[in-house]
Amino acid sequence: MLNFKNGRWIMAEKVFNVYIDEAGDEGFKVVANKWLSSRWFVIGALVVPAEFDREMASVINKIKDRIKYRNKLKPLHFCKLNHKKKKVAIQEIKEKGHFRLIITGVYKPDLIKDGVLKNEKQFLYNYITRYLLERVTWLADEYKRKVRLTFENRSNTSFDQLDNYIQQVLKDPKCQIRKDMILSWRVLNKSQSKNLQVADSLVSSVYAALEPDDYGNIETSYIMELKEFLYIRKGNLFSYGLKLFPYSGDSRILQERILG
């Protein structure tokens, strides 16, 4: 793509648009050895080449048409769909292609004794987002692109605090977020971005493979449909597109199923 600047045509930077959503909660509420908070907290990114951004966004209307979504103006929430409709949503997104999915997830029962991650407000969200941004910028660097970030608005999250945290991290010489890769970031509601609704479907699909339902079951069929779109580098999925920590029994079970 060419842009006109200072009297001459120049090649515009190639960009990935990145849509970030989460599933689960950050709480650690346990009563009588029963977790009332979610066991898993997951943050994920839909990574779309800017030139395919509108094409990806169009999938939301197609999903709504296929599942006969009553209110076409209301955002699509994956968790509120039944299993058959969730399958349709994943099939339609998969058919669009032209995207990558990056997931970072933490199994909170293994952090129950970690005072900082457990007790300091928003630290867990910031910490996992750091892992996510590392991998987003690695992917972008491979394709010689920059990134523009869109976060889903969360009432209990201070994005100024997140920004301050990331800026401090970037000053660390050991920081693995690639420098000068992030062009901009913004915060939107799902009603303002169809691609945040796509991200919601993808992140929730992975969450379903991790978090047991009320009967102790997990649903892995969605993530198996999406496996080819997870970020893999040199044959390595679990350090890149599906970063789960700590590396415990629950993480290993999902890894074994995906590797099949």
Image (tube, rainbow, N blue to C red):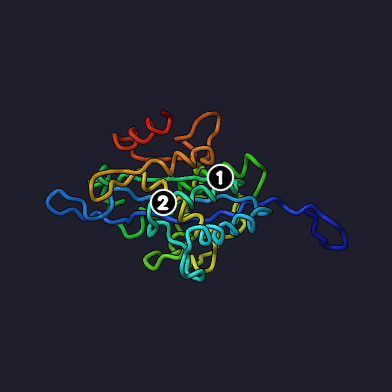
Few, some or many residues within 10 Å of mark 2 (<14, 14–19, 20+): few
From where the camera sits, is residue 96 visible? yes
Q: Position of residue 208 (x, y in %)?
A: 36, 47
Question: Could you tell me which residue is drawn at 12 percent across and 51 percent down?
Answer: 32
Is 86 in front, or is 54?
86
Mark number for residue 177? none
Mark number for residue 100? 1
What's the CA distance linking mark 1 and mark 2? Answer: 24 Å
Give the amino acid at mark 1: Arg
Question: Could you tell me which residue is drawn at 38 percent across and 60 percent down?
Answer: 80
In the rendered image, the residue lying farthest to the right is 7
Which SS class for mark 2?
helix
Number of callouts: 2
Q: Is residue 103 left or right of residue 179?
A: left
Q: Position of residue 17 (x, y in %)?
A: 60, 54
Q: Position of residue 104 (x, y in %)?
A: 42, 45
Q: Is residue 83 left or right of residue 9?
A: left
Give the amino acid at mark 2: Lys
Is 159 in front, or is 237?
237
From where the camera sits, is residue 160 visible? no
> Answer yes or no: do the residues labelled 1 and 2 have beta carbons within 8 Å?
no
Question: Could you tell me which residue is drawn at 30 percent across and 35 percent down?
Answer: 248
Q: Is residue 197 left or right of residue 10?
A: left
Q: Is residue 245 above or below residue 60?
A: above
Few, some or many residues within 10 Å of mark 1 (<14, 14–19, 20+): many
Which residue matches tag 2?
84
